[in-house]
Image: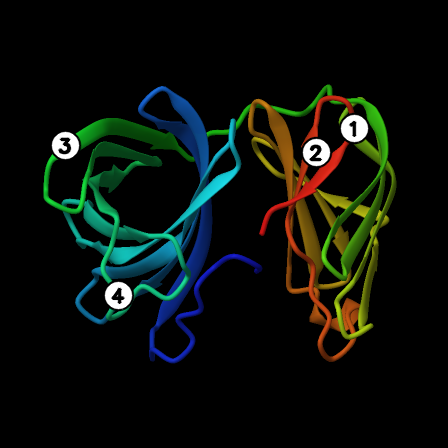
Amino acid sequence: MAGIVSLGALAQDKSENRELIGKVGTRSALLVLHASERADGSWQVAGEYVILPTLARRFVEGERAAVSGATVLKEGTTPILFGRPGIGELRGVWRDGAFKGRRYGPGGQERERFEFSEEFPSMEGYSASVRCDAKEGRYRAKLHLSVAGGKLAAFEWQAREPGGQVCTVVAKEQQPLRGGLRFAAGACRVTLRDVGEFLALRAENCAAQCGAEGYLVPLLIDRRGHCELLR
């Protein structure tokens, strides 16, 4: 998944991706994490959060305790945080679908509180028809999405990376998802979530739909139907 720091080099028994919606201080934010379980039951965690009003991105990595859920995530401005000074830390408890705590500056001073939840708004009644383009440099993406009453009518997502490799996902199957909509094309799954100011669209397991160097950058769709690349 684009934007998630890979932990594939670590030999882990179990790994999972999680999306959480909430606030950092007074600002709404989307948190996307990849967690890999260790032999002792603790978790290695990495990912990012996006401040939605400004689309500022912050990358995080750290640990989550096995029983208490106590979680400390170092925060930085690049995906590679190892060996680099952080710009802050998120310290709190991640348990029972919620991650709450305080954000601290690099000197240890408390900056603001944060609170995230894995519970997203229902999209059972969502209806829209979206056609949009997004680009950054030589990366291009096109989306055609049509949903009526929470049911998929049409979906095609195409992206071209700078070297010319293309990804094309045409989804005709819908899968159950609490707090969002999920569409599938074989093993490829696309998830649409309501995150307040935007809808967030992400893909996973879509390598078969892409050329050797192709990839799908997550999209944010505003209420007017315009798309932004989340990169």
Q: Residue at x 74, y 22 (%)?
A: 126
The kind of residue tagged 4 is Arg
Closer-to-camera residue (45/125): 45
Label 4: state its secondary structure: loop
Q: Which residue is mark 3?
A: 110
Q: Which mark is residue 221?
A: 2
Q: Position of residue 112 (x, y in %)?
A: 23, 27
Q: Position of residue 13 (x, y in %)?
A: 35, 72
| Comes first in the chain, label 3 or label 4 | 4
Task: State left or right for residue 22 relative to residue 175.
Answer: left
Point out which mark residue 69 bears.
none
For the residues bearing labels 3 and 1, Cβ distance under 8 angstroms = no
| Label 2 or label 3, whichever comes before in sequence order | 3
Q: Residue at x 21, y 33 (%)?
A: 101
| Amino acid under disc 1 | Gly
Q: From the top left corner, tell me how far across and down residue 91 is, in percent.
A: 18, 41
Q: Which mark identifies residue 225?
A: 1
Tell me which numbered mark, 4 or 1, is placed earlier along the sequence: 4
Determine crowd level at label 4: few under 14, some 14-19, many 20+ residues with C-alpha closer than 10 A: few
CA gap between label 3 and label 1 equals 38 Å
For label 4, the residue is 84
> Label 2 sits on what residue type?
Ile
Q: Which image quarter: residue 83?
A: bottom left
- Camera-side residue: 70 or 139? 139
- The local secondary structure at tag 2 comes to strand
Q: Nearer the viewer, mark 4 or mark 1?
A: 4
Question: Toward the viewer: 27 or 20?
Answer: 27
Marks 3 and 4, Cα distance to the nearest angstrom? 21 Å
- Name the mark nearer the viewer: 3 or 1: 3
Which quarter of the rendered picture does the N terminus lie within?
bottom right
